[in-house]
Image (tube, grey):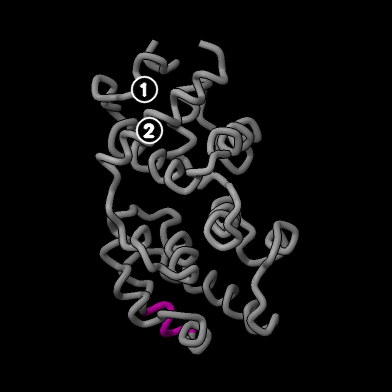
Amino acid sequence: MDEKNKTRYFRRHLLKWFELNGRDFPWRREGVTNFELVFSEVLLQRTRAETVAQYYPVFFGRYPDWNHLVQATDEELEEVFRPLGLYKHRAKRMRKIIDEYKQKNGELPKNRNELSDSSFASLYTSNAYELFVLKRRAPLLDVNMSRLLKRYFIPGEMQDVRNDKEIQELAKKVTNVKACKELNWSILDFSALVCKARKPLCEECVLRSKCSFRK
């Protein structure tokens, strides 16, 4: 199968799988604000989605919008992040975002160039911002998406996604479809539930007949 058809097969089967097996998280539901979408992705960094889902009402109950968040003190941020772990690091990062928001009088990045110069500039967060706020196609590329893409398309040693230009370009190409958001979520869910880092469930995989890793 050529690369183009292999990519189509990947998208089609994962989207179909997602319709039946996709996980239900609060940030994926109807009516979620851009504020919730972006900061959910900030919370998800280095944290299991199930953990963030349990913590979601705590954070957004306390900080439902920018007006509430900008009033937070460092002590309050550390307190609210404590249950997630790495609370000092998270509080410091959130303080940077808040300070930048104040300095720019509430102006948020409106394009990719402004985004690259902002506190949302990390690979994963900038892509999430571009996808959810700017409404442009972008991959939610993390170690889980990277693992699934590499196994299916280009088996080899895993690298840090921040430095792996090949996987970055592949992720952009694969998710460049109208249903970009849903495809991103399907990849993340499939890599968490089926294409696991250890003991992947290859016999249950809807991609197994075309997967390079299994051959």
Point out the residue furthest to the bottom here.
71
Q: How far across and down, in percent of the image, does residue 107 sit? A: 67, 77
Are circles 1 and 2 on residues that touch, CB within 8 Å? Answer: yes
Q: How far across and down, in percent of the image, does residue 24 sit? A: 27, 53
Q: Secondary structure at mark 2?
A: helix
Q: Name the residue that disc number 1 marks.
A: 207
User: Which residue is depicted at the point 24% across and 24% down?
Assistant: 204
Local crowd size for mark 1, using a 10 Å CA cut-off: few (<14), some (14–19), many (≥20): some
* In the image, residue 155 above or below residue 17: above
Q: How far across and down, in percent of the image, does residue 114 sit? A: 73, 64
Can residue 75 be found in the magenta stretch? yes
Q: Secondary structure at mark 1?
A: loop
What amino acid is labelled 2 in the image?
Leu
**Viewer-nearest residue: 128 or 192:** 128
Can residue 73 be found in the magenta stretch? no
Which of the 4 quarters of the picture holds residue 55? bottom left
Q: Main secondary structure of the magenta part?
A: helix
Which of the 4 quarters of the picture holds residue 115? bottom right
- Left or right placement of residue 150 versus residue 106 in this view: left
Q: Name the residue that disc number 2 marks.
A: 14
* In the image, residue 12 above or below residue 212: below
User: Which residue is depicted at the point 54% across and 33% down?
Assistant: 174
**Viewer-nearest residue: 25 or 46:** 25
Question: What range is drawn magenta here?
Answer: 74-79
- Left or right placement of residue 2 versus residue 78 in this view: right
Quote the CA–CA distance across marks 1 and 2: 8 Å
- Left or right placement of residue 69 versus residue 84 in this view: right
**Quarter of the image with the C terminus in it:** top left
